[in-house]
């Protein structure tokens, strides 16, 4: 377990002030900025950000200061409460804007319209300001007023079409964890950094219009380029890539009832040899009559996969079949974790299918510092958060403060502004 | 300015780029779209086949070959391409001259490949003091799995993303593609740009270690805190339940079978969510007006009642969804204020959704051998330095004359000689 970041160390974005004005769709972008040191001021309405009411709660006790959903997405930020329905807040808002390098909003609260301030004036008074808007279909889109949510955006933008089971009577699946929102926020953060580097070079800021639906659309790999390039359509398959043509299963249940993704099974001469050795190590050779074929495979001159897929070379097909049989047999004798580590030590690209919490506790990720303890004094406990998504060696990532209480920094921030 | 005025956002930056596939190539593709000069280095001795996507399907026509693969082109739009055999003495010399005039060196090889060539961070730093070296590999460059190999599905499996994508009583569905190749590339792009901003402030370069598995681990935060704080694992009876919403709790919230569209596939699906009681009341009115008296049941009026009766509710809504195609039902619901969309096929979302055109999302570029082909654009627009995409992936060595000639100052004869010798 790693403890919190060194408060004295410089962080890559600790020269920046950011105003976050919006809902859960942009909160991930704000966390990415804040955990790199930016002073992210989350402006909340008097009743608080709606996600403060989201499950799960600490000890399952609903309270706006106990939402773990809110906590996760709001580390390292400060909270200022401002009522945009009260026009007397316009001056304070403009002062905040003036102090900011970056604003990002989800077009939820419309401070410009409700406070009656002039957007064009703000941009011309603050020529270095970067203002990023994150909305479902892009600000100004004919669809942008539609009611949408992570699930419906994942359906509209292409995630769901590809994700599911061989059995097409089962529905397409939305990946867990609000990944449509994450993808929009990922593009918002990349865009903000792009505009920031331009500003570093020229001093010039600008407005950025990020579209969540479009972000999902261009995060679909073969789903999109199969259509763009050859007008072909991929179809979902259990635990593997959706394909224009069906492919072989690549997910096996192991002896402990857990799954591994076998990736690409043995397909090179050396791999057939390694597969044989693995069976030998486990004392399983006598349980697989086809094992001898693996030795034949190991002696082959190299061949192209097209020779296999053509399907007319019976010896090759039998050798490939033996490789798959060997993996099935090994999986039936080993736990998923054993299968994974042993396969990888033989050089096979295999993955254990961890639950998220198993991943967090996996010795590799623990060793790499992916458990980060953050003090929550109000509860009198430390909370373990997942750690850095990238390891910079200078100006590096850290959770600089626990998520803010509602309005915790209102007085502090407003008095800083004078 | 649609897609042909070169962006000036990053035009002051040069990247010496070994990235490939999607997990790496996607990062520098993004930066190239905003004007960065990305010089992609490929080994002429195997026609750049380190990148296994080179030459892979789909194809625009019947032609096949390393310059004709759709995915490779898609992920390398806008980059320059040079050939260079780094295992030759002269190749190393050229590489080092290139590093000396670059801001960053980027790669997503397996752990240890760059080191085996003698180019770890310290070696690169000797060539250029403020160089930024960003390495992206599945498990990162330390720890028990440093030597393990990954690609998208393995990253998703080991980080929890595959498992959390499932419905009850079924095996993991996975994602159906390499979500983490895309997203790993996004995090790599972020890391590159964060390091450049740090350099702009301090003058310091640095080494950055990006592990796609760790980026993936951060994408399940609320589930993880539910475990670390409340001790509640996602691996438990009845879970994961990804089409329902637990955080926050909502009902209905699901994907339902709908009436297929004539002439299209023999299945169609619709996603529907009621965010709160108000949404349900609006949906109830649509259902009741359509003759579904069951929806008026007071038990469903509040979230608690709907969650308690979730299976029954899902099955009745499912029956209603079979009355129309998913676009018709979605429109009815959205007009009433309820989030709903068809599960769109690639054709529907790319060519029929008005938002694709509004967003100018699929620019047509020209690649030297493939000709004109559409690619993934960037889902954001800038008022002053918007992205552009005009040229496709470079064919092998397409930019040798510019890079070796104009940037490094070699004569035509020298370039021809290096080509002859197999150095480039």
Image (cartoon, coloured by chain):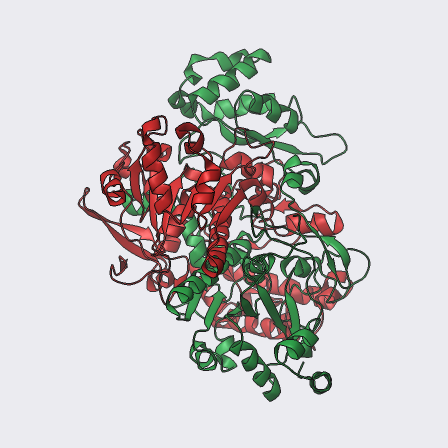
Chain colours: A red, B green
Residue B343 as seen in the image, left or right of residue A278: right
Q: Position of residue A418 (x, y in %)?
A: 25, 42
Please report the residue visible at 66 percent of the width from the left and 61 percent of the height from the top: B72
Please report the residue visible at 26 percent of the width from the left and 38 percent of the height from the top: A410
Quadrant showing the C terminus of chain B: bottom right
Nearest to the observer: residue B200 or residue B136: B200
Placement of B55 over or under B407, stated as above or below: above
Please report the residue visible at 50 percent of the width from the left and 59 percent of the height from the top: B189
Instruction: Give the quarter of the image for residue A117.
Output: top left
Instruction: Give the quarter of the image for residue B322.
Output: top right
Q: Position of residue A56 (x, y in %)?
A: 34, 37
Placement of B131 over or under B156, stated as above or below: below
Q: Position of residue B28 (x, y in %)?
A: 56, 62
Nearest to the observer: residue B307 or residue A222: A222
Q: For the view shown, which residue lies furthest in the right direction?
A: B62
Residue A310 as seen in the image, left or right of residue A66: right
Q: Position of residue A15 (x, y in %)?
A: 35, 56
Residue B196 visible? The answer is yes
Residue B23 as seen in the image, left or right of residue B126: right
């Amino acid at each position: 377990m790693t403890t919190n970041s060194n408060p004295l160390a410089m962080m890559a974005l600790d020269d920046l002030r950011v105003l976050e004005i919006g809902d859960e769709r942009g909160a991930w972008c704000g966390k990415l900025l804040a955990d790199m040191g930016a002073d992210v001021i989350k402006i909340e309405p008097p009743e608080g950000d709606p996600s403060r009411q989201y499950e799960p709660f600490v000890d399952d006790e609903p309270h706006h200061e106990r939402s773990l959903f809110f906590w996760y997405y709001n580390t390292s930020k400060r909270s200022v409460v401002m009522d945009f329905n009260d026009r007397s807040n316009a001056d304070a808002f403009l002062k905040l804007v003036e102090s900011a390098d970056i604003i990002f909003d989800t077009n939820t609260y419309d401070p410009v319209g409700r406070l009656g301030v002039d957007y064009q004036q703000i941009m011309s008074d603050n020529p270095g300001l970067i203002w990023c808007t994150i909305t479902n279909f892009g600000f100004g889109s004919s669809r942008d007023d539609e009611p949408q949510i992570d699930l419906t955006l994942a359906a509209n933008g292409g995630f769901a079409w590809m994700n599911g089971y061989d059995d097409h009577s089962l529905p397409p699946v939305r990946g867990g964890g609000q990944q449509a929102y994450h993808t929009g926020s990922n593009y918002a953060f990349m865009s903000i950094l792009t505009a920031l580097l331009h500003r570093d070079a020229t001093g010039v800021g600008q407005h950025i219009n990020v579209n969540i639906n479009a972000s999902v659309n261009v995060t679909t790999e073969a789903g999109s380029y199969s259509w763009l390039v050859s007008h072909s359509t991929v179809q979902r398959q259990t635990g593997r890539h959706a394909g224009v043509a069906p492919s072989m299963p690549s997910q096996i249940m192991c002896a402990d009832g857990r799954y591994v993704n076998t990736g690409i099974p043995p397909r090179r001469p050396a791999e057939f040899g390694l597969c044989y050795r693995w069976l030998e190590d486990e004392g399983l050779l006598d349980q697989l009559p086809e094992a001898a074929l693996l030795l034949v495979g190991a002696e082959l001159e190299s061949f192209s996969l097209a020779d296999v897929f053509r399907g007319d070379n019976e010896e090759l097909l039998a050798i490939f079949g033996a490789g798959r049989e060997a993996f099935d047999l090994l999986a039936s004798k080993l736990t998923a974790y054993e299968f994974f580590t042993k396969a990888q030590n033989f050089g096979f690209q295999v993955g254990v299918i961890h639950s998220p919490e198993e991943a967090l506790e996996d010795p590799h990720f623990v060793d790499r510092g992916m458990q980060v303890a953050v003090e929550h004094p109000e509860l009198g406990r430390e909370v373990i958060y997942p750690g850095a998504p990238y390891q910079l060696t200078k100006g590096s990532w850290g959770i600089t403060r626990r998520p803010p209480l509602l309005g915790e920094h209102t007085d502090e921030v407003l008095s800083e502004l004078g | 300015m649609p897609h042909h005025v070169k962006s000036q956002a990053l035009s002051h930056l040069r990247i010496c780029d070994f990235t490939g596939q999607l997990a790496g190539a996607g990062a520098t593709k993004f930066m190239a779209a905003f004007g960065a000069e990305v010089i992609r280095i490929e080994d002429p001795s195997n026609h750049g086949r380190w990148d296994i996507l080179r030459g892979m399907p789909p194809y625009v026509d019947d032609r096949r070959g390393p310059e004709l693969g759709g995915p490779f082109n898609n992920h390398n739009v806008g980059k320059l391409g040079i050939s260079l055999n780094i295992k030759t003495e002269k190749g190393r010399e050229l590489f080092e001259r290139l590093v000396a005039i670059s801001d960053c060196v980027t790669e997503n090889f397996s752990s240890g490949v760059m080191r085996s060539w003698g180019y770890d961070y310290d070696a690169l730093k000797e060539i250029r003091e403020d160089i930024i070296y960003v390495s992206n590999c599945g498990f990162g460059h330390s720890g028990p799995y440093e030597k393990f190999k990954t690609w998208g599905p393995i990253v998703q499996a080991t980080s929890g993303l595959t498992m959390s994508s499932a419905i009850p009583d079924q095996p993991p569905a996975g994602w159906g593609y390499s979500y983490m190749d895309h997203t790993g590339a996004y995090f790599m792009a972020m890391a590159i740009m964060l390091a450049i901003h740090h350099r702009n402030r301090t003058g310091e370069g640095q080494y950055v270690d990006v592990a796609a598995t760790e980026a993936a681990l951060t994408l399940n935060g609320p589930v993880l805190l539910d475990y670390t704080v409340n001790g509640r694992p996602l691996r438990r009876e009845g879970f994961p339940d990804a089409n329902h919403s637990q955080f926050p709790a909502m009902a209905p919230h699901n994907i339902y079978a709908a009436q297929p569209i004539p002439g299209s596939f023999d299945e169609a699906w619709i996603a529907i969510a009621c965010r709160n009681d108000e949404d349900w009341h609006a949906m109830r009115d649509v259902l009741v007006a359509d003759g579904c008296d069951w929806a008026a049941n007071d038990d469903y009026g509040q979230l608690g009642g709907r969650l308690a009766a979730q299976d029954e509710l899902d099955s009745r809504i499912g029956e209603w969804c079979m009355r129309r195609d998913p676009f018709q039902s979605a429109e009815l619901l959205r007009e009433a204020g309820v989030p709903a969309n068809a599960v769109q096929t690639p054709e529907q979302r790319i060519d029929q959704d008005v938002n694709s055109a509004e967003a100018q999302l699929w620019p047509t570029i020209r690649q030297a051998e493939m000709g004109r082909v559409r690619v993934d654009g960037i889902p954001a627009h800038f008022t002053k330095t918007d992205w552009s995409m005009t040229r496709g992936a470079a064919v092998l060595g397409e930019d040798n004359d510019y890079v070796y000639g104009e940037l490094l100052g070699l004569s035509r004869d020298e370039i021809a000689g290096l080509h002859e010798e197999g150095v480039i």
